[in-house]
Image: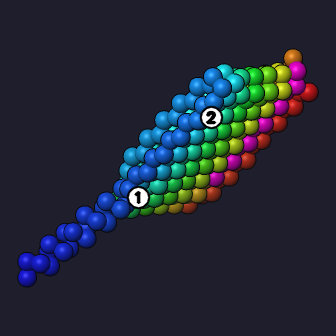
Amino acid sequence: MKRVPIIATGMVLAMTAASLAAEARATSVATNGGSATSTSVAIGNGRSDAYAGATNGGRAVANSTATGVGIGAARSTSVAVADRGLAVSNSSATARGSWWGGAIADSQSVAATVGGVALSDSNAYSEGSLGGLAESLSHSTATSFHGIAISDSAAISRGWLGGRAVSTSDSLADAYGGIAHSQVRAISDGSVYGSATSDGLGVAVSGPYRAARADVRAVGVAHRSARAATRVSAVEIRR
């Protein structure tokens, strides 16, 4: 008779371990005097990947962090590639689910340059509690050819008391001998069975000796069975 509680306890521990499984991978490749550094951290139910590649004296840095707590799942990917320039990519995803709430966070960051500077930051944050659902998707891309490209993307969602919140943020900066800066913020908050959705898109493209900037902020808030949807886009191209 003692075997039954022992087996049940083992099953519970196995299920807990599976739900909190973490996976982290980091890869760095450097040739011809290049310098590449990658750092990957995964906690709880998170998956983190970081890839860095540099050549011809270039420097590439990729940092990725993923954290999933409770009934939360997080995925973070960071890629940095540099040829005679500097590329820095940072990606962070955090998802929290508790009291039967669910949360999903997905963050992707890419920085690539040839003889210039590319800086990319992506941050996805979600928090679902008390039966709420929160989902955050953030993508940031910075590319430059003998120019400076800066891309910053953040998606923040909060769902609680049966509410649902979904945020999607996409940022792109592309510089060809100039300066391009894109910043996007998507924020949604759904509570008491409310549903909120926020979508933000920012694109900045610059040519030689030109500067382009795109700033986007999308905010959606819904309470007490209400619905809110926000979509904002900004595109600036200077060639």
Residue furthest to the bottom in view is 1
Quadrant for residue 175, please give it.
top right
Quadrant for residue 111, please give it.
top right
Q: Of 70 and 99, which appears nearest the observer?
A: 70
Residue 198 lies within the magenta run: yes
Foreground mark, 2 or 1? Answer: 2
Residue furthest to the left in view is 1
Find numbered disc 1 in the image and state the secondary structure of the residue it sits on. loop
Q: Amino acid at mark 1?
A: Ile
* Image position, residue 60 (x, y; %): 61, 29
Res. 131 in view? yes
For the N terminus, give its image quadrant: bottom left
Q: Main secondary structure of the magenta part?
A: strand
In the drawing, what numbered circle is on residue 113? none
For the point 62% across and 34% down, the residue is 53
Colour setting: rainbow
**Apparent side of residue 110 relative to residue 123 in the rendered image (left or right):** right
Q: Of 101 and 118, which appears nearest the observer?
A: 118
**Residue at the spot of label 1:** 71
For the point 35% across and 62% down, the residue is 18
Q: Is residue 137 above or below residue 10?
A: above
Q: Amino acid at mark 2?
A: Gly
**Apparent side of residue 193 relative to residue 187 in the rendered image (left or right):** left
Whichever of labels 2 and 1 marks the residue nearer the N terminus, that label is 2
**Residue at the spot of label 2:** 53
Quadrant for residue 154, please give it.
top right
Q: Is residue 178 above or below residue 54?
A: above
* Image position, residue 171 (x, y; %): 71, 38
- Report the magenta residues as a range: 197-208
Q: CA distance from mark 2 to mark 1?
A: 34 Å
